[in-house]
Amino acid sequence: MKRTKIIDLLASEGSGEKVLCKGWVRTRRGSKEFSFVELNDGSCLKNIQVIADQSLKNYPDIEKITTGSALSVAGALTPSPGKGQKWEIQAESIEIIDLAPDSFPLQKKRHTDEYLRTIAHLRPRTNKYGAVFRIRSELSYAIHRFFREQGFKYIHTPILTASDCEGAGELFRVTTFDPDTPPKIQGKVDYQQDFFGKETNLTVSGQLSAEMLALSLGDVYTFGPTFRAENSNTARHVAEFWMVEPEMAFCDLAGNMDFAEAFIKYLVVYVMENCMEDLALFAKFVDKQLMATLDNIGSSDFERLVYGEAVDILKTSGKKFEFPVSHGQDLQSEHEKYLTEIHFKKPVIIFDYPKGIKPFYMRLNDDNDTVAAMDVLTPRIGEIIGGSQREERLDILEARLEELNLPKETYWWYLDSRRYGSVPHSGFGMGFERLLMLVTGIRNIRDVIPFPRTPKNIEF
RNA sequence: UCCCCAGUAGCUCAGUCGGCAGAGCAAGUGGCUGUUAACCACUGGGUCCGCGGUUCAAAUCCGUGCUGGGGAGCCA
């Protein structure tokens, strides 16, 4: 007999049919006469209630079933006379696949997120984390679906790279050398003898490679892991995260912003239409404002303003900031929060930033002072998307590299793309975990990725 | 990396002015019940984060280290 998942059992219309169900025990309430077993298989938030009568030949064993144990249950799916569930399984046989000893750390009560992080291998067995990781899966699918509907090609950019993409952030070095005895030449490590013959790192962004594919396939996107060795100890940063990076040929900054806004809205609406059961858990236990926030994002036009306007608003806000606002300086977290949470009360896109605070590849505006950059800020998260129109003019790009003292030689292939059929193009990066935080209301990024990597933590 | 806070039973926490280590939940045993994080009774359970110091006496005060959390910087 084939196993039926609980999500399908609960959606069943008939009753009395024989079913086979397998899963993990959330709780057992029992007596000599019979036991109630709540079984969950991860297919959905809800459990199926199993009725185990003492007439079962292994009933003495069933009485010993503990939270966390794995069972295989065969029986009849029948309407439940009790409150709280539509169906239940009248068990005809229960096989105990594995009995969890009483050291099983998850109890039938609420645990703190901090504690659950220390048992990250088991926390997906809880309602909350099961819901998080189901939504993570659904949103991954929604991302691919959105891009496919828009005619984008899904491309794969390298994880191992020799180019420090933006000079952004600390890099994880990759080497086959024995760290105690690397070969040296003139006192320095001789990377020519290393696997790739030069210094190698984990990627901090697939953007530069993605641009090459955009300038051939048209509209492309990547969706994969990214690594930053920044010693960031915040609820918004992890060392390994997943980033979505679309890159669009023949697209300017305005088109880029339109696309970013449509993208976020699509994903927010998608989870509201497809993940309501799990979302309801977050709305109830994590963030009471969640549904209002999501409605707001899905239905409102994102506010768009140039960097200079944002600075003016902050300056005349009358609010005292820890860090003073000034033209030419990057916006601080508190400034972004004020704009999106207090002033506009909805997502905000800020564009045309001063070139001094942005990387070399962003397109220089005609004022010679700002670049065609844009950041999408949302309430509670802050920056969820950072993007730009890319500099497509070879002479200006080379001048910028020189200005920033970056080695032109390592970017020879990147510059080649501006030499042969260069066209205006744009793209952005969206932190997938930050999107998940936005959608679930969860405030710590470590709780939306199964096994978070942060400074001093690579357990699991 | 900087600032602040915390670390006590398996978990969540209380522990007053420095004076015998506590509760709820969980677990074990028994009872009871179409139950809903079931319920009732009993039982067991401690490196009070580590190291050093002050003191007749330290979970409590001081120093230091480690770990976790909040905020900041950096960013997605």
Image (cartoon, rainbow, N blue to C red):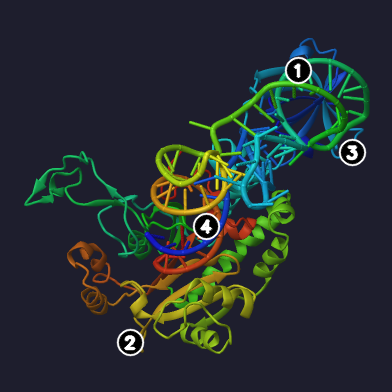
Q: Toward the viewer: A9 or A50?
A: A50
Q: Which residue is mark 4?
A: A235
Q: Is residue A380 shown to the viewer in this render?
A: yes
Q: Which residue is mark 2?
A: A368
Mark 2 or mark 3, which is nearer the start of the sequence? 3
- Where does the N terminus of chain A fall, quadrant-wise? top right
At 53% from the left edge and 73% from the top edge, which residue is drawn?
A334
Label 3 Cα crowd, 10 Å radius (few <14 / some 14-19 / many 20+)? few
What SS does tag 1 mark? helix
Mark 4 or mark 1, which is nearer the start of the sequence? 1
Question: Which mark lies nearer to you, 1 or 2?
Answer: 1
Going by the image, does A153 lie left or right of A70?
left
Q: Chain of mark 2?
A: A
Q: Which residue is mark 3?
A: A83
Q: Chain of mark 3?
A: A
Mark 4 or mark 2, which is nearer the start of the sequence? 4
- What's the distance in space between the residues labelled 2 and 4, CA to CA? 36 Å
Mark 4 or mark 3, which is nearer the start of the sequence? 3
Residue A198 locus on image (x, y percent):
18, 51
Mark 2 or mark 1, which is nearer the start of the sequence? 1
- What's the distance in space between the residues labelled 1 and 2, CA to CA? 76 Å
What SS does tag 4 mark? loop
Mark 1 or mark 3, which is nearer the start of the sequence? 1
Q: Residue A43, relative to residue A456: is it above or below?
A: above
Residue A230 locus on image (x, y percent):
37, 57
At 26% from the left edge and 76% from the top edge, which residue is drawn?
A400
Residue type, numbered disc 1: Ile
Q: Chain of mark 4?
A: A
The image's mark for residue A62 is 1
Q: Toward the viewer: A73 or A148?
A: A73
Residue type, numbered disc 2: Asn
